[in-house]
Image: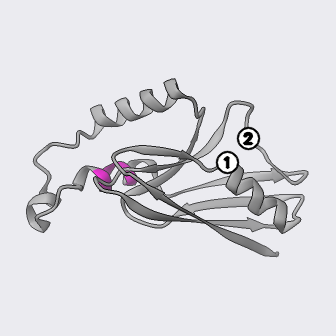
Amino acid sequence: MGVHGGLLRMDTPGNGHIVDLTEGVAQVVSTSGVERGLVTVFATGSTVAVTTMEYEPGGVHDLQALLDRLVPSSSDYEHNVRNHDTNAHAHLRAAVIGPSETIPLVDGRLALGTWQQVVLLDFDDRPRRRTVTVQVLS
């Protein structure tokens, strides 16, 4: 089995910002030359997540609103109390979504649906420099 990889780096404003990673992931796949295999997309950090969705303004808004309802930013979180911090909600949201996705690679292309994109969600309550590791397994 061969492993090829790349890094995607970006600055994000945090606060639930969602970034479409699909093009960057596809570029790593293209440079790998792999036709069939798996692609793993992993975000480094405990307040960031990776998932797939239909990346369009309505879908982005609805996902952000859902997460605001499920894990409100202002609540009595033990993490904030113990650490004199304000981002417990970010850690919890990231844990619920998860840091990675694995996507099949077929004929050199990500096997995503027509309206499906790979996205990064930055939940922290301040801007961050984010790193996403993309590994192509053949």
Q: Nearer the viewer, residue 78 or 10?
A: 10
Rendering coords of residue 101 (x, y %): 60, 53
Magenta stretch in the rendered image: 90-94
Q: Quadrant of residue 1?
A: bottom right
Numbered label tally: 2
Mark 2 nearby-residue class (10 Å; few <14, some 14–19, many ≥20) = some
Check residue 127 in the rendering and tell me which mark sits there, or answer none. Answer: none
In reply to whether residue 131 is colored magenta, the answer given is no
- Quarter of the picture holding the C terminus: bottom right
Residue contact at pointers 2 and 1, CB within 8 angstroms: yes
- Residue found at the very far bottom of the displayed protein: 2
Rendering coords of residue 116 (x, y %): 66, 36
Q: Residue at x 38, y 51 (%)?
A: 13
Please name the residue that numbered disc 2 is placed on. Answer: 112
Amino acid bearing label 2: Leu
Rendering coords of residue 58 (x, y %): 50, 24
Q: Residue at x 80, y 53 (%)?
A: 105
Please name the residue that numbered disc 1 is placed on. Answer: 22
Left or right of residue 66: residue 37 = right
> Nearer the observer, disc 2 or disc 1?
1
